[in-house]
Amino acid sequence: MKKLPMLLFALALCLVLTACGGGNSSNSGVTLADFNRIETGMTRNEVIEILGRGTEISRVDMGLGSEFVTVMYSWDGRGSLGANMSVTFQGGNVISKAQFGLR
């Protein structure tokens, strides 16, 4: 249980760093409609089919087995300056998602 606060801190830090990422207002990147298609419990492969591979921005492995490995990926988005989204996986399945400025 002592490792849970460290994991939560790492995830919060990744969300902040993701919000500072790229993104643009051109026709490249993920959309709000793409973001809305991602659901908790989806596998990494299901997300790749919708969004593409993305960029790994964080990995936390506390050595407790693959079901506890937490990985966060980000994608540049379509929308306002700096538009982006991130998806966090644990054990290979979506546990959370976040977006900024997507249209």
Image: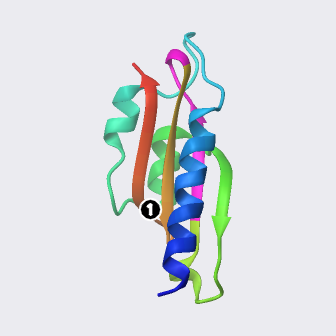
Answer with the quarter of the image where residue 60 lies.
bottom right
- Residue 56 in percent (x, y) is at 67, 52
**Amino acid bearing label 1:** Thr
> Can residue 24 be seen here?
yes
- Residue 70 in percent (x, y) is at 56, 68
Vertical arrangement, residue 97 with respect to residue 100, above or below: below
Please rate how many residues cluster around mark 1, counting C-alpha atoms within 10 Å: few if below 14, some from 14 to 19, many from 20. Answer: some
Residue placed most toward the observer, 23 or 16: 16
Q: Is residue 78 magenta?
A: yes
Circle count: 1
Residue placed most toward the observer, 15 or 92: 15
Q: Residue at x 55, y 82 (%)?
A: 3
Q: Secondary structure at mark 1?
A: loop
Give the quadrant of the C terminus: top left
Residue placed most toward the observer, 86 or 9: 9
Q: Residue at x 63, y 32 (%)?
A: 20
Q: Residue at x 52, y 54 (%)?
A: 12
| Lateral position of residue 41 relative to residue 70, left or right | left
Q: Is residue 80 magenta?
A: yes
What residue did someone put label 1 on?
Answer: 43
Vertical arrangement, residue 84 with respect to residue 93, above or below: above
Vertical arrangement, residue 26 with respect to residue 51, above or below: above
- Stretch in magenta: 71-81
Vertical arrangement, residue 83 with respect to residue 34, above or below: above
Q: Main secondary structure of the magenta part?
A: strand
- Residue 72 in percent (x, y) is at 58, 55
